[in-house]
Amino acid sequence: MKAVKILLLNNVVAMLMVMMVSSATFALELNISAIDGLLNLPAGARLCALLLFGMTAFPGVLAGALLANVVYADPMSIHASVEVYSAIAEATAPLIALIMMQQFKLSNFYTSKGVFIPHVLFLCILTALLSSLSQFLIMTNIEHGMTRDLNLSEYMGSILLGDILGTLVFFSLLIFMAQAFTEHLKQTSD
């Protein structure tokens, strides 16, 4: 029974984490239009939730991505009909990246000294690649909703860049805050 409670708690925390970061990103992009689409911080949150809680937190990550899509999606967008597919693809990309890295024995994310940065960095890039590839597949299958003047390669490049920057910035901030918190605990215990 205790394992079920922990599993449910992990999924709820993962869902809230994805929702809160999606809310913060939406507010940030709404107020600073120059960074609209430049930082996809929810990609980092989805990946971080799976790293923290394991692959069993995927239902929470998926629920958070779908809820954020329902709350923050623009119903007047030309791609409003496929936003759900996009949210599912974005939530699934970190899971597939983690499975791929486990299969190739590259899932050494934690060491006795802390986080193993090269594997986390590669995981961020692989997640961004898989996410942008899934977005590309979705976009090529919805020809009826695409305008003729849309440059698909430029659009996909911006998605890839936003995912890479979003995951790297999210993990950089997370590692910085964890180290600062650890130092604070050391100082207060002395």
Image: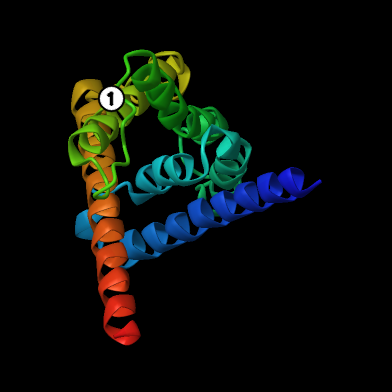
Inspect the image, locate mark 1, and give the three-letter code of the amino acid beneath it: Leu
Up-down relation of residue 98 to residue 179 (above or below): above
Q: Position of residue 60 (x, y in %)?
A: 61, 43
> What residue appears at the point 46 percent right and 34 percent down from the top-left corner?
78
Q: Is residue 80 visible?
A: yes
**Where is the C terminus found, in terms of image quarters?**
bottom left
> What residue appears at the point 47 percent right and 46 percent down from the top-left corner?
49
Report the side of 67 relative to 24 (left or right). Answer: right
Q: Position of residue 147 (x, y in %)?
A: 34, 26
Residue behind mark 1: 129
> What residue appears at the point 31 percent right and 37 percent down from the top-left corner?
109
Up-down relation of residue 55 to residue 101 (above or below): below
Report the side of 5 relative to 36 (left or right). Answer: right
Q: Is residue 146 visible?
A: no
Q: Position of residue 58 (x, y in %)?
A: 57, 35
- Residue closer to the observer: 33 or 129: 129
